[in-house]
């Protein structure tokens, strides 16, 4: 049941483009406090919190695998200050507000302030997909969310140690020693685990099909051993382990990362349902209006103060700072940590500790709902949102690629041509096209290829291997339906057993009978890419009939600017109001000398209606 409910919530979130946490929390509340269908404590018993701890460890490890230091080089100081100074500001402001608004003990308000420091990748990453801010903002938020999770959990542990030891004469020294022990053990085992696993993977001692199992086993082992030696140090250890692997150039982590991403989705979905199901309606109602006032303090005072103080002297402009000040949703680590320590504090004699869980979930729901509903609009208003990913990454800057790129750019789509031949890049730049000089699947491209506003790949190289490599590299980023390939001569002139499989090359552009060499030949003969607008009186069938065999439809553009490519076995039916970009034979009066034809792509009027 939990699996089906989690899938339904994730699917619904995908359809309506909102963070899945909204639907997961809602489903958990319905299954738990509203209907009593699900009781996590009865279902899992003593295994519930070990399950939560291991799941959070995997989530943090997966997030830390994406932390490549080169991505954040320009804003590293901002991230560091957000983690240290920003966290301190948030902690202090929220602790004071919680004490006076909710009338709870200082010890619990300070602990709650530490819990709310944590944002987390479980809510940041889905929100970034929806908001699509500029790369600067996205990198800062992603790094902050991943790094603050283990450090925030560490802060909560230290505060907890101070609370339970305050009655002892050596309470301060006990808490400080606990902090040093957690930090030392977590750091040592995390770096040791990362180095050991990287050493094994670099030498190929583990076959490909066992890499995921080996990685998962080592993560569990490091987390368990670290927690055994220093309680609550495991989260720090697995985060450092992932960061070490992510920044080892000779360690290939793509397959591991894909596996961990899928596993994290499963765990995050299940955990939110389980933790929300543990709430009780009486605890939520008893809080009254205080959580709303606390949310206002966090949103309008704590977060802006943390961001603006942390960004002093940085290159961020006021628009970027404003959006950073608005986005700080709380996620799974805050929920898991509050549930864990609420129970422990109740056992230690703090009767009001039970309010920590409903209060934390109120903050989670409030920040996610408010920021999910407003952040995309705010990013657009501030002009710090990426454009819709309707542009094209084009493999090749040869005459065919340049002709197609010029036609698409004339329709106001962003195009980026990549090629390792300087002559082709030079000609493309002279045509006013955006270019990347290099191999799109290189490590250099991973760090420097600017894909802002780009969501489709056109593989237009005459070398089939280049097209396939690019298709496989960007398939996970753009999606299978957005990978297009123009066939090379080898794909059309050889037997089937020597051709590339359809699963590797993406959708075939312009039909099976069109290849790169044929397209280039038609351009050399004077064929041009032209624009034709369809009307009620002149439809697509009329367009084909007028031109007979002297036209090759390339792209169709709807009145709203959405584009579709004509592909092999495609079922597209252009309607009135659509524009057709097509490769069209020249009329007799347009024939020009051959030396003036190569690569020409103009858009003269062509509407027989």
Image (spheres, helix red, strand yellow):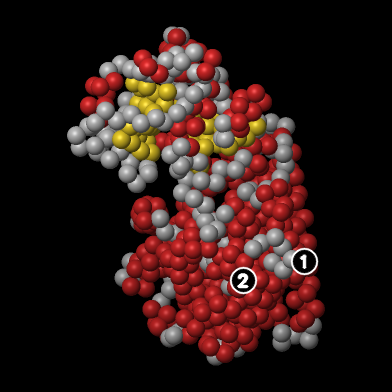
Q: In this view, does 553 lie to the left or right of 497?
A: left
Tell me which residue sits at (43%, 86%) in the image.
Answer: 288
Q: For residue 25, which numbered disc appears in the image?
A: none
Relative to residue 380, is residue 348 depicted above or below? below
- In percent of width and height, residue 105 lies at 60, 88
- In percent of width and height, residue 358 lies at 47, 77
Q: How far apart are marks 1 and 2 (CA)?
A: 22 Å
Which residue lies under the disc numbered 2?
Answer: 117
Q: Is residue 552 left or right of residue 242?
A: left
Dot 1 and dot 2 residues touching (CB under 8 Å): no
Relative to residue 600, is residue 594 depicted above or below? above
Mark found first going from the N terminus, 1 or 2: 2
Q: Quadrant of the N terminus?
A: bottom left
Look at the numbered disc 1 and give the secondary structure of its residue.
Answer: helix
- In percent of width and height, residue 538 lies at 22, 32
Tell me which residue sits at (58%, 68%) in the image.
Answer: 322
Tell me which corner region of the image, top left, top right, bottom left or bottom right, holds residue 349. bottom right
- In percent of width and height, residue 333 lies at 56, 64
Front-lying residue, 399 or 507: 399
Tell me which residue sits at (38%, 78%) in the image.
Answer: 281
Look at the numbered disc 2 and give the secondary structure of its residue.
Answer: loop
Which residue lies under the disc numbered 1?
Answer: 181
């Amino acid at each position: 049941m939990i699996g089906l409910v989690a899938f339904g919530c994730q699917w619904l979130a995908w359809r309506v483009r909102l963070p899945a946490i909204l639907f997961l929390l809602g489903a958990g509340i319905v299954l738990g406090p509203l209907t009593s269908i699900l009781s996590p404590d009865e279902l899992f018993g003593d295994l519930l919190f070990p399950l939560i701890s291991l799941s959070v460890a995997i989530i943090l490890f997966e997030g830390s695998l994406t932390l490549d230091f080169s991505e954040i080089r320009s804003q590293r100081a901002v991230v560091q200050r957000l983690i240290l100074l920003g966290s301190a500001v948030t902690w202090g402001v929220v602790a004071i507000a919680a004490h006076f608004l909710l009338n709870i003990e200082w010890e619990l308000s300070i602990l709650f302030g530490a819990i709310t420091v944590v944002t987390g990748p479980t809510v940041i990453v889905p929100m970034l997909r929806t908001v699509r801010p500029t790369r600067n903002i996205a990198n800062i938020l992603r790094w902050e969310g991943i790094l603050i999770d283990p450090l925030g959990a560490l802060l909560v542990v230290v505060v907890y140690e101070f609370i339970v030891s305050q009655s002892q004469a050596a309470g301060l020294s006990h808490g400080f020693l606990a902090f040093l022990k957690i930090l030392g053990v977590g750091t040592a085992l995390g770096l040791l685990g990362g180095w050991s696993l990287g050493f094994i993977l670099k030498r190929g001692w583990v076959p490909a099909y066992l890499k995921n199992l080996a990685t998962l086993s080592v993560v569990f082992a490091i987390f368990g051993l670290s927690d055994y030696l220093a309680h609550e140090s495991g989260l720090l250890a697995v985060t450092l382990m992932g960061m070490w692997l992510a920044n080892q150039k000779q360690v290939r982590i793509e397959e591991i990362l894909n596996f961990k991403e899928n596993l994290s989705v499963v765990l995050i979905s299940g955990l939110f349902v389980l933790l929300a199901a543990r709430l009780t309606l009486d605890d939520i109602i008893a809080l009254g209006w205080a959580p709303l006032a606390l949310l206002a303090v966090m949103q309008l005072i704590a977060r802006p103060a943390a961001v603006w103080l942390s960004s002093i002297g940085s290159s961020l402009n006021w628009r970027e700072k404003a959006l950073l000040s608005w986005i700080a949703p709380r996620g799974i680590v805050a929920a898991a940590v509050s549930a864990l320590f609420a129970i422990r504090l109740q056992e230690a004699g703090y009767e009001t500790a039970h309010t920590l869980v409903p209060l934390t979930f109120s903050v989670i729901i409030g920040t996610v709902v408010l920021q999910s509903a407003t952040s995309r609009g705010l990013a657009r208003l501030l002009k710090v949102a990426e454009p819709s990913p309707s542009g094209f990454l084009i493999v090749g800057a040869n005459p065919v690629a340049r002709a197609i790129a010029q036609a698409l750019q004339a329709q106001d789509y962003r195009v980026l041509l990549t090629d390792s031949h300087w002559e082709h890049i030079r000609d493309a730049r002279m045509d006013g096209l955006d270019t990347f000089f290099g191999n799109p699947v290189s490590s250099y491209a991973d760090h420097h290829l600017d894909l802002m506003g780009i969501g489709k790949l056109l593989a237009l190289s005459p070398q089939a291997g280049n097209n396939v490599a690019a298709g496989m590299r960007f398939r996970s980023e753009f999606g299978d339906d957005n990978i297009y390939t123009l066939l090379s001569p080898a794909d059309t002139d050889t037997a089937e057993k020597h051709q590339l499989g359809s699963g590797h090359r993406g959708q075939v552009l312009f039909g099976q009978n069109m290849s790169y060499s044929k397209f280039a030949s038609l351009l050399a003969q004077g064929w041009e890419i032209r624009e034709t607008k369809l009307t009620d009186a002149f439809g697509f069938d009329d367009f084909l009939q007028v031109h007979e065999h002297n036209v090759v439809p390339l792209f169709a553009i709807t009145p709203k600017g959405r584009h579709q490519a004509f592909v092999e076995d495609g079922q597209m039916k252009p309607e009135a109001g659509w524009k057709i970009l097509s490769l069209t034979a020249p009329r007799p009066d347009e024939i020009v000398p051959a030396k003036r034809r190569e690569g020409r792509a103009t858009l003269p009027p062509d509407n027989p209606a």
